[in-house]
Image (cartoon, rainbow, N blue to C red):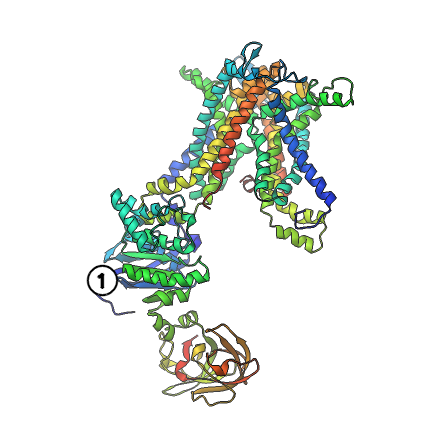
């Protein structure tokens, strides 16, 4: 985790938070702190406990043990309607019986804010989210993206210390989701508010966040910047969950001070550097015969047509099994001679690959520093 | 995840539960349970002197020894079952037509058209049938005008008239549950069954009817109950000799002021209706709670 | 079969004819009642003697119209007050019941729910007599032991109201529960999250959401009470609600003034029914 800065600048802090439902541990001993004005994402598969964690922050559930602090003060005994956090719900939960303006004004009314002030603050908020004329509309008249913005405006008008977002983009179609990602990030920067965003979509987390926590089985596997998660996954789960990878089951056939010689079950032999991959185990203890799982990103594989020397520690000959064309994300499925399984290779966007076909022979290779090794 | 959603607001404390449950318990015990317990107790006693009562089965033995009583009872049961079956037979094609054959506004219109007669009092509906069926009524006049008969015909005061009225009065309670369940049947299931080689009859038998079963059962239960407990229609359309069991109950309570006998009759009717509802649920393998909601 | 599956024109023709006949069967009795309210005859039957409005407006016997028939007008008033009472009682309890069954878990919930449904399968006459004897038992007990004479426990309008309330509540509960069940729980959480107190949540979010169901249930309740006969018959005292008054007249044989009352009833219930359809129509879902 990042070096802890002084407590005062932390908008939200969790200390050893645990929550169980019967025999099931939904959230286990989670601690983290989020500095003011940052965009923090919790990324994990469904059922990993992220919703429970968020609901504890909002006050809809209380932890069995541990403490939750907002601006340095424990909020465990504060009911949800008095916590200085607001939440954007998964399906937004805009009130269908009210107009857009009434939705935005709802929280202010509950605080008995003066009528005129409510009016100006609502109008101001609506124009800040780019919907100055939407006030009189019914919620059902709004488009998906507009509803999204109103749901956020309804919270931000209350100046919350922390804004919680529970997979709010999940219901949108792909195009709109891409657009809303950018918009959400811009909103967060504009308001300089602290956002906690939970999602199972890694792309949402990577694009928007300053910090991402990857969560699995109720625990944080790794907390770090999107780059750190992608390039230096600390655990096998993170390596598998974030980004695409080729995966192999392998064992160590030889070792020296630079690295390991590995033999995959599919019959591939390759060289890997030390200290790449697993941060949770001491790689010095790994001896010959140790079982490992290897991860290799498709874009870190070099590829060339025909027989060519690639100059990488690991180099092979193979032929194209199929071409998966998808614009900039196109891939080749390559069968390495003598090995059983297929290799995913990013297709370089260069002229020499324009006419590549199924059955063409190719040279593939990757450096030993690209192979991420993890204990099984 | 969704399993844990909303726990905190739901268990908003024992006090809330207590506040909500006490009116329910009061209602159920004061208006449903205790009155029926009282009904049982009164049916099991006999007046031995003024204001003095003793335990006795005599009200029930009277039922079995007096042929008029149990014949009326059996007749009511059989005719109610018949009326239920007829209502189902007549309503099913109509419900299917509304649910599956027509769409949009026309469908809504037909459905509302089905409902309208039943927003009007049963008394008015029965009155309409009286005007149609009586000797000086519309049908009699029509037949004379057509020259098919040469003098007025009395069509009231017989079993057919009772049956027509009972079926008419129950129709809504059959059509609505049928339309609701049939609307839930995906058209593509029917198409698939037909595509796989089913004849019209087989498709209806194998796909449509099993799907509509909850609606059929709930419709039948409600119709049967209403018919069995009907008083107006048999009395008005069947006249003096309609021999409906509810009339016996009314007579014992109001005319003869023999509450003990009336209570026994009430219990017998309740037992009969509960038994038939139970049997219907068992035969169709439906649960009471599911069918009723 | 459904339109997408081919069937012969002959079959379609017969099917459509059947449905048309069915609707004729539905409308016929009501149409006849309505038409004969305008017949210029002392009896609601053939022959047709030409039109008249006497059965609505007639001022003296034997052609006393409904607007001057004090007995019938009085019974309409009685029915109105009874229905209003039943509606208020039933709606309050039904709303409580809906919240109880949809929002709480407790031991014996399934059993209580089943018990709540039983009034649907108790014949109205029996419900009526059981309440009659129970209230009489209590009244007799109080009179014998304490010398108290409690008038409203004897047959009369209070008992009619309670008797109808006993089973109509179940129907109102079902209507309101059905809507509450479809309520998106996160709306309440969102309101809470925006700083509303529990009471404010119910007032500003939940009840407005339930409003169409409550109005709809209210209309159904009102109509059911207004038209109830079986239970009322057993509990009625000297003041007759409309259905009882009409029944007595019917048995005696009456002038077409009954047709005129029926027309008013039809118009009234049609208006209420249409309002309930309109109110319950989902607008924003």
Q: Position of residue A246 (x, y in %)?
A: 47, 76
Relative to residue A303, is residue B214 drawn left or right? right
Question: Badge 1 local density, few (<14 within 10 Å), some, or many (20+)?
Answer: some
Q: Is residue A256 visible?
A: yes
A119 up-or-down from A238: above or below: above
Q: Position of residue C285 (x, y in %)?
A: 46, 46
Residue lying at 72% horizontally and 21% vertically, measured from the top left: B140
* Viewer-nearest residue: A50 or B263: A50
Number of numbered labels in the structure image:
1
Q: Position of residue B34 (x, y in %)?
A: 49, 28
Q: Position of residue C109 (x, y in %)?
A: 47, 41
The chain that hosts pointer 1 is: A
Residue hosting label 1? A9
Q: Is residue B265 visible?
A: no
* Viewer-nearest residue: A133 or A245: A133
**At numbered mark 1, what does the secondary structure look like: helix, strand or loop?**
helix
A234 up-or-down from B24: above or below: below
C272 up-or-down from A304: above or below: above
* Viewer-nearest residue: A182 or A124: A124
């Amino acid at each position: 985790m990042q070096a802890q800065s002084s407590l005062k600048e932390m908008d939200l802090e969790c200390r050893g938070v645990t929550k169980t439902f019967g025999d099931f541990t939904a959230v286990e001993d989670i601690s983290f702190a989020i500095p003011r004005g940052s965009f923090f994402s919790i990324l994990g598969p469904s059922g990993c406990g992220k919703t429970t964690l968020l609901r504890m922050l909002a006050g809809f559930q209380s932890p069995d043990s541990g403490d939750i602090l907002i601006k340095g003060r424990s909020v465990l005994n504060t009911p949800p309607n008095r916590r200085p956090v607001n939440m954007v719900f998964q399906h937004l939960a805009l009130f269908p019986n009210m107009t857009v303006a009434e939705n935005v004004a709802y929280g202010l009314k509950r605080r008995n804010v003066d009528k005129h002030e409510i009016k100006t603050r609502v109008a101001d908020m609506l124009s800040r989210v780019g919907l100055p004329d939407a006030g009189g509309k019914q919620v059902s008249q709004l488009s998906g993206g507009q509803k999204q913005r109103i749901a956020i405006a309804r919270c931000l008008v209350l100046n919350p210390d922390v804004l919680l977002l529970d997979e709010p983009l999940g219901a949108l179609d792909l195009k709109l989701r891409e657009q809303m990602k950018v918009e959400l990030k811009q909103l967060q920067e504009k308001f300089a508010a602290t956002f906690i965003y939970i999602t199972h979509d890694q792309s949402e987390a990577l694009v928007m966040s300053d910090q991402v926590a990857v969560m699995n089985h109720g625990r944080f596997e790794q907390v770090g910047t999107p780059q750190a998660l992608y390039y230096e996954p600390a655990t096998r789960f993170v390596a598998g969950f974030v980004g695409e990878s080729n995966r192999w089951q392998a064992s160590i056939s030889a070792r020296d001070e630079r690295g390991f010689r590995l033999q995959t079950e599919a019959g591939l032999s390759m060289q890997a550097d030390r200290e790449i991959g697993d941060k949770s185990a001491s790689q010095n203890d790994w001896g010959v015969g140790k079982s490992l799982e290897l991860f290799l990103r498709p874009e870190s594989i070099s590829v060339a047509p025909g027989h060519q020397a690639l100059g990488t520690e690991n180099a092979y000959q193979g032929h194209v099994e199929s071409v998966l064309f998808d614009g900039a994300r196109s891939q080749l499925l390559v069968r390495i001679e003598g090995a059983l399984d297929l290799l995913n290779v990013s297709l370089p966007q260069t002229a020499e690959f324009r006419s590549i076909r199924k059955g063409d022979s190719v040279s593939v290779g990757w450096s030993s520093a690209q192979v991420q090794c993890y204990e099984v | 995840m969704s399993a844990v959603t909303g726990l905190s607001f739901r268990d908003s404390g024992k006090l809330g539960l207590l506040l909500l449950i006490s009116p329910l318990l009061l209602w159920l015990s004061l208006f449903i349970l205790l009155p029926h317990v009282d009904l049982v107790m009164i049916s099991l006693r006999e007046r031995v002197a003024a204001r003095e009562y003793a335990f006795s089965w005599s009200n029930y033995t009277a039922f079995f020894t007096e042929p008029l009583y149990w014949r009326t009872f059996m007749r009511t049961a059989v005719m109610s079952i018949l009326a239920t079956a007829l209502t189902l037979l007549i309503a099913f094609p109509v419900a299917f037509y509304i649910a599956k054959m027509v769409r949009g506004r026309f469908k809504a219109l037909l459905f509302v058209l089905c409902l309208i007669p039943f927003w009007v009092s049963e008394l008015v509906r029965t009155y309409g049938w009286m005007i149609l069926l009586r000797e000086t009524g519309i049908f009699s006049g029509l037949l004379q005008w057509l020259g098919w008969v040469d003098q007025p015909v009395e069509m009231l005061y017989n079993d057919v008239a009772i049956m027509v009225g009972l079926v008419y009065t129950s129709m809504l309670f059959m059509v609505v549950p049928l339309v609701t369940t049939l609307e839930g049947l995906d058209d593509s299931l029917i198409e698939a069954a037909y595509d796989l080689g089913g004849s019209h009859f087989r498709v209806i038998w194998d796909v449509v009817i099993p799907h509509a079963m909850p609606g059929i059962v709930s419709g039948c239960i409600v119709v049967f109950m209403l018919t069995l407990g009907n008083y107006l229609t048999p009395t008005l359309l069947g006249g003096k000799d309609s021999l409906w069991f509810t009339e016996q109950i009314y007579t014992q309570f109001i005319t003869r002021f023999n509450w003990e006998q009336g209570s026994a009759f009430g219990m017998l009717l309740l037992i009969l209706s509960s038994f038939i509802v139970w049997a219907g649920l068992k035969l169709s393998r439906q649960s009471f709670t599911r069918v009723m909601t | 079969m459904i339109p997408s599956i081919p069937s012969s024109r002959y079959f379609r023709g017969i099917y459509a004819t059947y449905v048309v006949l069915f609707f004729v069967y539905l409308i016929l009795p009501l149409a006849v009642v309505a038409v004969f309210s305008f017949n210029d005859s002392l009896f609601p039957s053939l022959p047709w003697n030409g039109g008249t409005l006497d059965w609505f407006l007639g001022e003296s016997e034997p052609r006393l119209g409904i607007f001057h028939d004090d007995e019938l007008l009085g019974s309409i008033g009685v029915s109105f007050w009874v229905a209003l009472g039943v509606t208020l009682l039933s709606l309050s309890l039904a709303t409580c019941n809906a919240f109880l069954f949809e929002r709480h878990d407790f031991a014996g919930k399934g059993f209580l729910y089943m018990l709540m449904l039983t009034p649907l399968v108790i014949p109205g006459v029996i419900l009526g007599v059981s309440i009659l004897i129970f209230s009489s038992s209590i009244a007799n007990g109080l009179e014998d032991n304490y010398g108290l004479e409690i008038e409203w426990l004897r047959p009369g309008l209070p008992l009619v109201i309670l008797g109808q309330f006993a089973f109509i509540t179940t129907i109102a509960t079902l209507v309101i529960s059905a809507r509450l069940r479809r309520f998106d729980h996160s709306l309440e959480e969102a309101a809470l999250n925006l700083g509303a107190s529990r009471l404010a949540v119910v007032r500003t979010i939940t009840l407005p959401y339930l409003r169409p169901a409550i109005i709809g249930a209210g209309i159904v309740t009102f109509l059911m009470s207004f038209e109830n006969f079986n239970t009322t018959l057993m509990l009625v005292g000297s003041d007759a609600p409309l259905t009882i008054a009409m029944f007595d007249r019917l048995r005696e044989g009456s002038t077409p003034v009954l047709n005129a009352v029926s027309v008013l009833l039809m118009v009234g219930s049609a208006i209420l029914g249409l309002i309930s359809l309109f109110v319950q129509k989902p607008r924003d879902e």
